[in-house]
Image: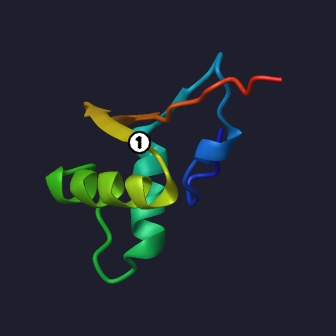
Amino acid sequence: MAKPHSMPDPKDRSVNSPSCIASGTQVLGYYNAHNKNEKKERVVESVKKWYVDQAKKEGWEKANFHGSDCLLEVGVELKKK
């Protein structure tokens, strides 16, 4: 899984594994690394909104929070030969 200060890469996904879960610790680490003047101790609504926006900029199609964890999903298709 990704380091706490990096977003998982949607290009690393496959047909068998089109999603991944970013733990609350990873979400918070990524947020705090990019918002040094507004560090948070918990995954609150403002952190969730910011993380979803960042995930979509990185190429994730869906980013949904379940508690403090975020399910990241991307569509993956098989290439025909």
- Residue furthest left as drawn: 45
In this rendering, position of residue 54 left or right of residue 44:
right
Q: Secondary structure at mark 1?
A: loop
Quadrant of res 18: top right
- Residue furthest right as drawn: 81
> Could you tell me which residue is drawn at 25 percent across and 31 percent down?
67
Quadrant of res 15: top right
Residue 26 image position (x, y, % from top left): 49, 47
Task: Residue 20: tell me if it is visible.
Answer: yes
> Could you tell me which residue is drawn at 69 percent across and 23 percent down?
78
> Could you tell me which residue is drawn at 65 percent across and 38 percent down?
1
Task: Residue 68: tell me if it is visible.
Answer: no
- Residue furthest bottom as drawn: 37
**Structure colour scheme:** rainbow
- Number of labels in the image equals 1
Residue beneath label 1, please?
Answer: 61
In this rendering, position of residue 63 left or right of residue 78:
left
- Residue furthest top as drawn: 16
- Image position of 19 with respect to 3: above or below: above
Q: Amino acid at mark 1?
A: Glu
In this rendering, position of residue 48 left or right of residue 16:
left
> Could you tell me which residue is drawn at 29 percent across and 63 percent down?
40
Foreground residue, 47 or 10? 10
CA neighbours of label 1 inside 10 A, class few (<14), some (14 to 19), many (20+): some
Foreground residue, 44 or 59? 59
Residue 81 image position (x, y, % from top left): 83, 23
Residue 19 image position (x, y, % from top left): 52, 28
Residue 5 image position (x, y, % from top left): 56, 60
- Image position of 63 with respect to 59: above or below: above
